[in-house]
Amino acid sequence: MEPQPASFIPSLLPASSKLSCTKESNPYPIPCLAADVLHMRVKEGSKIHNLLRLAIARLQEERRDSNGSSLRQVLFTGSGRGLTKTITCVEILKRKIGGLHQLNKLYYKTVNEVWENSQQGAPDVTMQKTVPAISVLLSKDPLDPQEPGYQPPETQSAPTLVTERCSTTRRPALGASPQDTAKRLCRDDWSVCST
């Protein structure tokens, strides 16, 4: 079973089916992980609502472990088609729970797929793929700002004149249809209130 290059497309084989898929297990490329870090593995089929409900509950609970400390860090990891969902989870969590320090690490994972060959007597085909992956650490405690991929907590700023103007002009007038309101907004100043 010789590994095939990534350009090999198993769907071109007649009636081939995937037998197994194994991922190379590498240690996460993030330094300073706490022992009690909550690890959220995000996959293509993961439900964002379920992931966030667990992470928010664990970060906000006052329960303490045997050492008397509460959960301070959450690690989100995702690869391949789950990459964008991982980033979405992180961004939503940062807005729901303020003051989180963030550390991002991008890397690649090697995935070996074994495909059954429908021709009798022919060996199964093994395909080796390299897929992008991301690990994002969110921490209540400060992280090393010199570490590549570090993002400080977002500061809550007061509403600016632009956001105030957009929120007040977007309300439809009584008796006006939503289409008329949208046209009026576009004529007023499109660059300020465009969505």
Image (cartoon, rainbow, N blue to C red):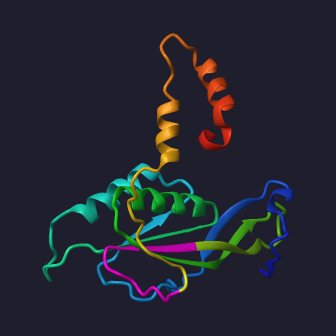
50 w.r.t. 189: above or below: below
Q: Is residue 15 left or right of residue 131?
A: right
Measuring from the top left, give residue 10's x and y in whole percent: 80, 62
Measuring from the top left, give residue 133's x and y in whole percent: 60, 73
Q: Quadrant of residue 148?
A: bottom right
Q: What residue range appears in magenta?
A: 134-147
Could you say which is closer to the camera, residue 29 or residue 80?
29
Could you say which is closer to the camera, residue 153 or residue 109?
153
Q: How many marks?
A: 0
97 w.r.t. 31: above or below: above
Q: Is residue 158 left or right of residue 167?
A: left
Report the quarter where the C terminus lies. Answer: top right
Could you tell me which residue is drawn at 14 percent across and 83 percent down? 67
Q: Quadrant of residue 113?
A: bottom right
Could you say which is closer to the camera, residue 104 or residue 68?
104
As for residue 142 lying within the magenta part, the answer is: yes
Q: Is residue 146 left or right of residue 55?
A: right
Report the quarter where the N terminus lies. Answer: bottom right
As for residue 145 lying within the magenta part, the answer is: yes
Could you say which is closer to the camera, residue 148 or residue 23?
148
165 w.r.t. 18: above or below: above
Measuring from the top left, give residue 176's x and y in whole percent: 55, 14
Measuring from the top left, give residue 36's x and y in whole percent: 29, 79
Could you tell me which residue is drawn at 24 percent across and 62 percent down? 60
Residue placed furthest toward the top: 175
Could you tell me which residue is drawn at 40 percent across and 58 percent down? 157
Could you tell me which residue is drawn at 39 percent across and 65 percent down? 155
